[in-house]
Amino acid sequence: MVALGAGDIAATLRRIQNDLFDLGADLATPGDDFVPGPMVLRMVAAQVAWLETAIDALNEHLPPLTSFILPGGSPGAAALHVARTIARRAERAAVTAARAEPLNPEALIYLNRLSDYLFVAARTANAGADPLWVPGGSRQP
């Protein structure tokens, strides 16, 4: 288990875990009505907005990107990169499912923003020491 400490990222991940249960309930009940109710749990715009705010808060303290980032770095960042790839895979699966069944658009947006949050959180966990892609850097022996 990778410890991310008791800081903002850890607290945000706890809230995201709760949201993921809401998301699972939402995706498990497709339909044409995406209004939350007492018996139907739906993702709502406020959950997406909260995630956007969390992304902005982390991005505020990061230097601009100058190259693509290779997944990895610290153990915490590496775990966040793995979670990011899983979130992207879930997003692709949900978009595919939405072609066959009506799914809540807020659920799809949340999945998209989640992978962005996890990317920015990984950069934050690396504290400015992200492993950067060096184009053609492996060509020399």
Image: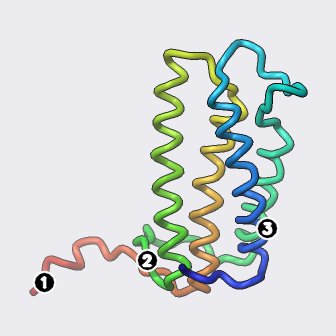
Residue 72's disc is 2
Looking at marks 3 and 1 on the same chain, the residue that comes earlier in the sequence is marked by 3
* Towards the viewer: 129 or 82: 82
Question: Residue sitting at 61 percent across and 80 percent down?
Answer: 125
Percent position of residue 46, x then y: 86, 43
Using the rendered view, name the quadrant where residue 14 is placed: bottom right
Label 3, label 1: how far apart the Cα atoms are:
40 Å
Question: Residue sitting at 84 percent across and 26 percent down?
Answer: 39
Position of residue 100 in the picture relative to residue 109 (left or right): left
Q: Nearer the viewer, mark 3 or mark 1?
A: 3
Which amino acid lies under the numbered mark 2 shown in the image of this protein? Gly
Question: Residue sitting at 68 percent across and 48 percent down?
Answer: 20
For the residue carrying disc 2, how many other residues have a C-alpha within 10 Å: few (<14), some (14-19), or many (20+)? some
Quadrant of the frame with the C terminus: bottom left
Residue lying furthest left = 141
Residue 57's disc is 3
Label 2, label 1: how far apart the Cα atoms are:
22 Å
Q: Secondary structure at mark 2?
A: loop
For the residue carrying disc 3, how many other residues have a C-alpha within 10 Å: few (<14), some (14-19), or many (20+)? few
Q: Which residue is mark 1?
A: 140
Which amino acid lies under the numbered mark 1 shown in the image of this protein? Gln
Looking at marks 2 and 3 on the same chain, the residue that comes earlier in the sequence is marked by 3
